[in-house]
Image (tube, grey):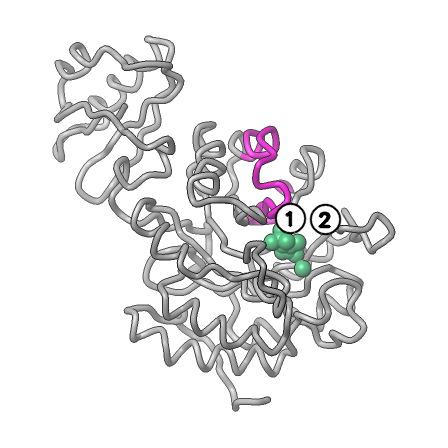
């Protein structure tokens, strides 16, 4: 259920409605929009008695949300959500594209700083780097853990980049929330409901990667888990799904971008690195991602990918990152977007 407040409803009237919903034993989720505030109701098994709610001052109407995802749905909030980062211009969603770049894994302080310097110069506002790695083999590099989080905190201070990193489980989520700016929930954990709920109880933006075979509805239900706990700063990310195609690691399903935009107000990024698994496919798919309306790109960059401890074959060189930014800058205006101001795009490189 959804309570739509009148455009001129006062904060006090909104509070009275929220209190009333909570008094009924449900949860109220006020979601302010440009025109009016809508208040999502969760925790109800069947229909909420709408009569009394409709009588409260400031209420325009009470409507049923028919989709299984409610808070993530455009029925509840028509305007696109923009996730902002205090004290910076960085944002995900909205007019400017968000660019998140960095290595798959933090391997050492030197490696991380070398790459951060290059992606910052190339125009990224966010730095990605794995501290806790979800590896198929238990014998593969598992990440530097807390040491990596500390290295990334130094990178934030030095280069002004916001930090995006993955949490593998409930313990590492606490640490990621403490040290990073965006808590990433990986494809393999997209339906780890306990982890999603815990991310919903924290007050940091959450980036949810699409599961390896998740439908659009399952993807949005993962977002709904986080939002149902009161954290509305959710960012989605398409990173390829499993298909019969064997020319690439995954099949990057760009068609999910307009499909998500149709039904949800949440921002959606595209990851052309995991989506293809091949360095030579990353730039073409990054261009396509911007063209189809993605809110930004998360991309793996490594200064020495041949020595990378994870995902070297899909990591692009810093010079290719610069080239990608130059290409994106040209495509963005066609779809009404820009790269953030102050970005430096140098000469193109191979
Ligand atoms: C990653 O971003 O390094 C990663 C492991 O991504 P995914 O969960 O999409 O495989
Ligand atoms: Mn990776």
Determine whether 319 is above or below 244 in the image: below
- Asked if disc 2 is less than 8 Å from ligand 1, the answer is yes
Query: At numbered mark 2, what does the secondary structure look like: helix, strand or loop?
Result: loop
| 28 to the left or right of 236 | left
Marks 1/2: CA distance?
9 Å
Residue 166: numbered disc? 1
- Asked if disc 1 is less than 8 Å from ligand 1, the answer is yes
The answer to whether the residue labelled 1 contacts the one labelled 2, judged by CB atoms less than 8 Å apart, is yes
Q: Is residue 62 magenta?
A: no
Residue named by callout 2: 134
| 287 to the left or right of 319 | left
* Quadrant assignment for the C terminus: bottom right
Identity of the residue drawn at 15% across and 15% down: 56
Q: Is residue 164 visible?
A: no
- State the image coordinates of residue 38 (x, y, percent, origin top left): 24, 32
Identity of the residue drawn at 69% across and 72% down: 302
Q: Which of these two is toward me, 199 or 192? A: 192
- State the image coordinates of residue 111 (x, y, percent, origin top left): 76, 69
Q: Which residues are magenta?
A: 177-199
Q: Is residue 268 visible?
A: yes
Q: Is residue 197 magenta?
A: yes
Q: Which of these two is toward me, 79 or 219? A: 219
Query: At numbered mark 1, what does the secondary structure look like: helix, strand or loop?
Result: strand
Identity of the residue drawn at 81% across and 51% down: 137
- State the image coordinates of residue 11 (x, y, percent, origin top left): 23, 28
């Amino acid at each position: 259920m959804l309570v739509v407040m009148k455009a001129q409803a006062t904060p006090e009237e909104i509070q009275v409605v929220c209190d009333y919903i909570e008094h009924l034993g449900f949860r109220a989720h006020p979601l302010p929009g440009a025109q009016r505030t809508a208040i999502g109701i969760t925790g109800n098994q069947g229909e909420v008695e709408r009569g009394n709610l409709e009588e409260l001052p400031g209420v325009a109407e009470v409507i049923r949300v028919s989709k299984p995802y409610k808070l993530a749905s455009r029925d509840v909030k028509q305007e696109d959500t923009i996730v902002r980062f205090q004290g910076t211009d960085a944002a995900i969603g909205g007019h400017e594209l968000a660019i998140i770049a960095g290595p798959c894994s933090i391997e050492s302080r030197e490696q991380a700083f070398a790459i951060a310097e290059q992606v910052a110069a190339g125009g990224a506002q966010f730095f990605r780097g794995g501290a806790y790695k979800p590896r198929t083999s238990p014998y593969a590099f598992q990440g530097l853990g807390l040491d990596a989080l500390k290295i990334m905190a130094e990178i934030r201070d030095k280069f002004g980049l916001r930090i995006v990193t993955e949490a593998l489980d409930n313990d590492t989520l606490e640490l990621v929330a403490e040290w990073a700016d965006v808590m990433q929930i990986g494809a393999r954990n997209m339906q780890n409901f306990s982890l999603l709920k815990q991310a919903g109880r924290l007050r940091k933006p959450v980036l949810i990667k699409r599961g390896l075979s998740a439908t659009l509805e399952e993807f949005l239900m993962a977002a709904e888990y986080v939002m149902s706990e009161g954290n509305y700063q959710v960012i989605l990310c398409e990173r390829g799904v499993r298909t019969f195609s064997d020319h690439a690691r995954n099949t990057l399903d760009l068609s999910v971008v307009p499909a998500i935009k149709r039904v949800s107000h949440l921002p959606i990024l595209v990851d052309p690195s995991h989506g293809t698994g091949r360095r030579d496919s990353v730039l073409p798919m990054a261009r396509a991602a911007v063209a189809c309306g993605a809110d930004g790109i998360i991309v793996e960059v490594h200064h020495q990918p041949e020595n990378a401890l994870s995902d070297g074959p899909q990591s692009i060189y810093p010079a290719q990152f610069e080239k990608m930014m130059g290409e994106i800058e040209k495509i963005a205006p066609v779809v009404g977007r820009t790269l953030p101001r102050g970005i430096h795009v140098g000469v193109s490189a191979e």
